[in-house]
Amino acid sequence: MSLHADIELRRGNLHLCAALQVEPGETLCLVGPNGAGKSSMLQVLAGLLPLERGRVELAGRVLDGGPRGVWVPPEARGVGVVFQDPLLWPHLTVVDNVAFGPRCQGRPRRMARTLAREWLARVGLSDECFTQRPAVLSGGQAQRVALARALAAAPSLLLLDEPLAAVDASGRTALRRLLRTRLFEFEGPRVVVAHQLEDALALADRIAVLEGGRVVQCGTAADLVAAPRSPYVADFVGLNCFTGNCRGGVVDLGGVQLAVVTPLEGPVSVTVHPRAVSLFRTRPEGSPRNIWCAVVEGLEPTPDRVRVRLGGDLALVAEVTPAAVAALRLADGGAVWVAMKATELQVVAR
């Protein structure tokens, strides 16, 4: 039941030209900046957007494109979709929303409702929700109903478009855990669009990064961390990334030069972990070869650290402890000295 997709289409300013392959039992997570083509790709797979060129094939069956110009309508594809907006039918009860798919497949009403109740229980909803209308549900409950509705139709392919985006922080962790469980149980290919690293790490076997309608990198989370191929990828996995030209152990970033230990020549990408960026109140003395003065542009607390956004000659992020923030008197607009050891900089050819 492998999914093979070679997609090309134009939609406004977007020129989507990307290829995907997802194996049975595998979850591929699509990430990328706004407008990169993530949701458009899911809509093509679901049959909601037509291809200009290319081919979509599921389990050896052509759903779209190919030499004969095949196009299978959405309802005949065997594809389950959960959108960012649950899109529940407001005039139907929760149980009838979920029973809709089995009913369309020809199951008797009683059998379809029994199946719907089973799936609603599997997504963690209590019996008291079954007869309610969608208008009284919380965001998390509505997404659970949408997931149950997609799975109750026994699809061959499951598509989830930012399923956690409309859920508040209090319900996000529980729903993420539920999604992981249900995805693991689903035997077909799964494609999930996500915006947050936590969601991608929890749900995906592989992550495909879309930028400007192209897949710029695809691999495991460890692959992306080890060698991010663009500043967006580096930022997504929590690293700093710069691009420039390397010559004689020095990378020219267009105004800033960084000393490195990797003997490369020509265009390169340089990555450094925020925790390898050291901050000082006064110019440090010692061995670091990369030292300059920066401006604090923002402080973002995390559970155990504070991310310090720095501007000036080189924009980057440092991570320090709350105690260091106090000791260094860090504040928006304040000056701070930055140091990075050459040995902490990872350099790869572009």
Image (tube, grey):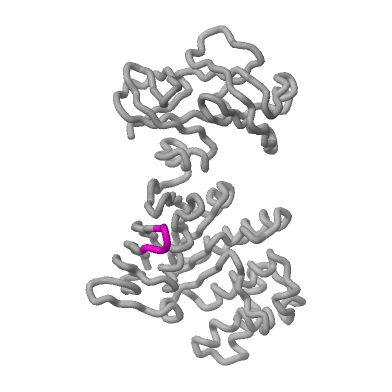
- Which quadrant would the N terminus be assigned to in this image? bottom left
Q: Quadrant of residue 4?
A: bottom left
Query: Considering depth in this image, is 345 or 176 the residue closer to the camera?
Result: 345
Residue 158 higher or lower than 340, as above or below: below
Q: Position of residue 140 (x, y in %)?
A: 68, 64
Q: Is residue 188 left or right of residue 121?
A: left
Report the predominant secondary structure element of the magenta stretch. Answer: strand
Q: Is residue 127 left or right of residue 54?
A: right
Residue at 41% over, 58% down: 14
Query: Considering depth in this image, is 284 or 202 the residue closer to the camera?
Result: 284
Query: Considering depth in this image, is 271 or 223 the residue closer to the camera?
Result: 271
Q: Which residues are the magenta region? A: 10-14
Residue positioned most to the bottom: 108
Residue 76 higher or lower than 303, as above or below: below
Does the stretch in magenta take in 154?
A: no
Q: Position of residue 212 (x, y in %)?
A: 41, 51
Q: Is residue 64 left or right of residue 48?
A: left
Residue at 35% over, 64% down: 9
Q: Quadrant of residue 139?
A: bottom right
Does the stretch in magenta take in 12?
A: yes
Tally of marks? 0
Q: Position of residue 329 (x, y in %)?
A: 73, 21
- Which quadrant would the C terminus be assigned to in this image? top left
Q: Position of residue 52 (x, y in %)?
A: 32, 68
Q: Is residue 160 left or right of residue 178?
A: left
Residue 18 higher or lower than 260, as above or below: below
